[in-house]
Amino acid sequence: MVSSSQQFERIRKRKATKNGKWNKRARRATGTPAFPVHPQGYDARAADARPAKADDHGKSPTGDASGSKT
């Protein structure tokens, strides 16, 4: 027979593992929440900005054809 402290150590570990398991599963199932990646006023020329769409026909991300910052 195992000691009382060993037994309760295992029980505590099992309970800690089980706590919140349903919430964790539910959060994983729902995925990433929808939020704006580039909010209004975001600099389109920033390093992490989205690339310009292919249907822009060579326009810069700001919309002007020259691409200069004025």
Image: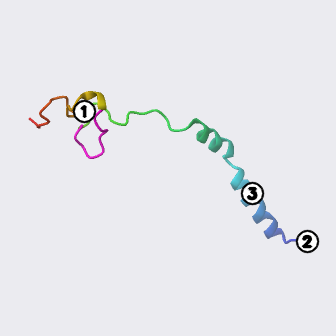
Q: Secondary structure at mark 3?
A: helix
Q: Which mark is residue 1?
A: 2
Mark 3 and mark 1: Cα distance apart in space: 49 Å
Residue displayed at 26% across by 46% down: 47
Kindly indicate the quadrant of the structure image that contains residue 58.
top left
Q: Which mark is residue 41?
A: 1
Q: Is residue 51 magenta?
A: yes
Badge 1: few (under 14), some or many (20 or more) residues near its Cα, within 10 Å? few
Residue displayed at 22% across by 40% down: 45
Q: Amino acid at mark 2?
A: Met
Residue displayed at 32% across by 33% down: 39
Q: Which mark is residue 70?
A: none
Q: Secondary structure at mark 2?
A: loop
Is tag 3's residue or tag 2's residue first in the polypeptide sequence?
Answer: 2
Which secondary structure dominates the residues rendered in magenta? loop
Kindly indicate the quadrant of the structure image that contains residue 28.
top right
Mark 2 and mark 1: Cα distance apart in space: 68 Å
Q: Which residues are magenta?
A: 44-53
Q: Amino acid at mark 1?
A: Gly
| Of the pair 56 and 37, the residue shown nearer to us | 56
The residue that mark 3 highlights is 14
- Residue 13 higher or lower than 70, as above or below: below
Figure label count: 3
Q: Amino acid at mark 3?
A: Arg
Mark 3 and mark 2: Cα distance apart in space: 19 Å
